[in-house]
Image: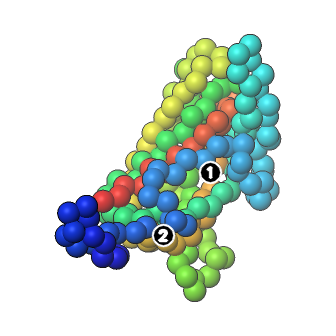
């Protein structure tokens, strides 16, 4: 914080946020996920009439990783919303998919080599129309480990649904862990 004078000469306190800790929602393009696990989702180019984009093709047990700094002003104990944009590669009525979000948060001087804590979605019903975009959200309580400025190691995987598993891959376009802030 620093003291600054406003237009009328009065002193007021100005808060500054470290530029390396974004005070905004985190958003991840699935095409940028790292291929560090044994079962790696394939990078896929989707070519449409009007739009082209890169995504990852997730079959059951595919996993990829990514990382980011925890943003400033986090509210421990609030809601962590996990949002994913995906579409089924092939049409299938009455089928489900399920995703797993894993995290490990390391502060300065912590070990970087620790196990993920997992938060699973429930079964998500897949649209029965091929290539329809789906946006699904699941929530959890934001763990105290999500401390401002710490480095969060993330993993995203597709796990088997509890019933009526979709056979084949889904295209994952984007993922967002929405961390509540004050």
Task: Tell me: 33 left or right of 3.
Answer: right
Task: Indicate whether 83 appears above or below 103.
Answer: above
Reading the image, the residue beneath label 2 is 18
Image marks 2 and 1: residues in contact by CB distance under 8 Å: no
Q: Measuring 60% from the left and 40% from the top, which residue is drawn there?
A: 174
Few, some or many residues within 10 Å of mark 1 (<14, 14–19, 20+): many
Residue 29, by quadrant, is top right
**Can residue 108 be seen by looking at this rendering?**
yes
Residue drawn at x 55%, y 20% as measured from the top left: 127
Provide the secondary structure element on which disc 1 rests.
Answer: strand
Residue 16 x %, y %: 40, 69
Q: Is residue 65 above or below residue 1?
A: above
Of 21 and 119, which appears nearest the observer?
21
Left or right, residue 32 beside residue 159: right
Viewer-nearest residue: 90 or 12: 12
Q: Is residue 53 above or below residue 77?
A: above
Name the foreground residue: 87 vs 54. Answer: 54
Q: Which residue is mark 1?
A: 156
């Amino acid at each position: 914080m620093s003291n600054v004078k406003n237009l009328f000469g009065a002193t007021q306190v100005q808060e500054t946020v470290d530029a390396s800790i974004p005070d905004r929602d985190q958003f991840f393009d699935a095409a940028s996920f790292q291929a560090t696990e044994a079962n790696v989702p394939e990078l896929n180019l989707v070519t449409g009439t009007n739009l082209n984009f890169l995504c990852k093709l997730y079959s059951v047990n595919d996993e990829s990783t990514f990382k980011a700094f925890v943003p400033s002003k986090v509210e421990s104990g609030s809601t962590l919303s996990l949002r994913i944009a995906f579409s089924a590669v092939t049409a299938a009525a009455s089928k489900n998919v399920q995703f797993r979000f894993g995290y490990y948060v390391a502060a300065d001087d912590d070990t970087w080599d620790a196990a993920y804590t997992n938060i699973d979605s429930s079964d998500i019903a897949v649209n029965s129309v091929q290539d329809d975009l789906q946006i699904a959200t699941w929530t959890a309580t934001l763990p105290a480990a999500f401390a401002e400025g710490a480095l969060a190691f993330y993993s995203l995987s597709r796990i088997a649904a509890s019933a009526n598993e979709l056979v084949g891959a889904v295209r994952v376009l984007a993922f967002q862990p929405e961390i509540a802030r004050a």
